Image: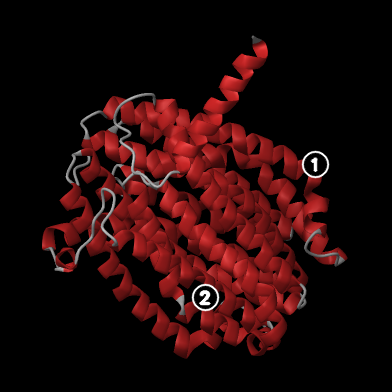
Amino acid sequence: MTTYTNYKSTKGIFAFIKLALSNTQQDFTTGSIRKAVFLLAIPMILEMCMESVFAIVDIFFVGKLGSNATATAGLTESVLAIVYSVAIGLSMAATAMVARRVGEKNSEGAAKAGAQAIMLAITITLLISLAGIFYAEDVLRLMGATKQIIEFGATYTRIMLTGNIVIMLLFLLNGIFRGAGNASIAMRSLWLANICNIILCPLLIHQFGLKGAAMATTTGRGIGVCYQLWNLLKGKGIIKIHLHHFLPDKEVLKNLLNIASTATLQFLIGSASWIAMARLMTDFGSDAIAGYTIAIRWIVFFILPAFGLSNAAATLVGQNLGAKQPGRAEESVWKTAKYNAIFMALVSLLFLVCAKFLVAIITTEPAVVEIAVTALRIVSLGYIFYGIGMVMMNAFNGAGDSRTPTWVNLFWFWIFQIPIAYLLAIVWHWGPKGVFIAIVVTETCITITSMLLFRRGKWKLVKI
């Protein structure tokens, strides 16, 4: 009897996972909230797991080219964080509006919101591409790169910035799919993009050196975007985008811009702070930059799946507010936060115990290893708070209230973190440890502040 029960239980779990990964939109305004969280979370986590693999594979192959290559990738990634911020801001706006329309059972409005967001994204990427073509060297110079790094890595930076359209659309189109409740398509597109990159990366690096890594990344993401567009335009599912949806709609564009501008600013504030942290690390030499870059890649490797789980909160909040169920929206957020905190607690333990092993996979240079291990162990101390904070931020954004997390980030990142990091690292001569400690303290304060503001419930009243 026990064997039969276990068989049925196992069979039920596989059936649930199969449902979560199926290419269908789901209505998350009724039924079990825990089931809704995991139906969204499973493909979102798998999606971000592949992005995590990409981050490590990329730095693994780049790291074989030496510390200058690793430093170039790290400094360029810090600048690309601005592109990611704009992409995530637009993606959040699209998710919020599409989810709200889906909750209202307004599929036409959902399609129009998605199309208008795509137009905005293409316009923005053209401006960034022009900057990448003409100012790649200046970008690296601004980040504090040495003359040797600029000469070695300018082409890599130019390719990455010029091809930013694939980054922008990959994030944005996945945001549209998530808002519609079809996280499976978002997962598949990112898997396709990153598998292509993993295959191309060693081949093109062997052929072209560092710039081959940029070529592989851009090509892989471009293939993922083509897959997204094919699914979005073929006319199946809740979201059916047609040419007439691209006709400018002032009201929809205004709502998108209102959410996207503050959401983008929200992430730009955080990204600018990370850029400032990278800039501080340049004062301690190429080994410090390389160690910091490797540590950040491992941190991102485990944070991205948690971010995937936290994305479930945005969809659940948006759809349930659209269905006039704010209580269900709030309950969804607290459940998601609990699951994310458990996951991040396990990751924190892993980093404390296995930091040296993880860093040794990428490099064995003693000075670089020391910096990377120190970063992993210190930053991991705040992982439980990071997990909860991600969910709170995504909940605000899913409700269309991107202003609240923007103000939270502005205060804690710019007014607090940057001065404290400079004080600890430079003025008090704590070195790189001062930067890492500032990161932990700041993220913890952001989470506590976000929880208090979420409990006040003003996000439930936002109209979009």
Nearest to the observer: residue 269 or residue 85: 85
> In the rendered view, would you say 42 is above or below 232?
above
> In the rendered view, would you say 304 is above or below 319?
below
- Lateral position of residue 195 relative to residue 102, left or right: right
Q: Secondary structure at mark 2?
A: helix
Q: Secondary structure at mark 1?
A: helix
Q: What colour scheme governs how the chains and residues are painted in the rendered image of this protein?
A: secondary structure
Q: Are marks 1 and 2 in contact (CB under 8 Å)?
A: no
Give the percent coordinates (x, y) of residue 341.
57, 34
Residue type beneath disc 1: Val
Give the percent coordinates (x, y) of residue 48.
54, 51
Nearest to the observer: residue 86 or residue 450: 86
The residue where tag 1 is placed is 353
Crowd class of label 2 (few under 14; some 14 to 19; many from 20; radius 10 Å): many
Residue type beneath disc 2: Thr
Crowd class of label 1 (few under 14; some 14 to 19; many from 20; radius 10 Å): few
Label whose residue precedes the other's in the sequence (1 or 2): 2
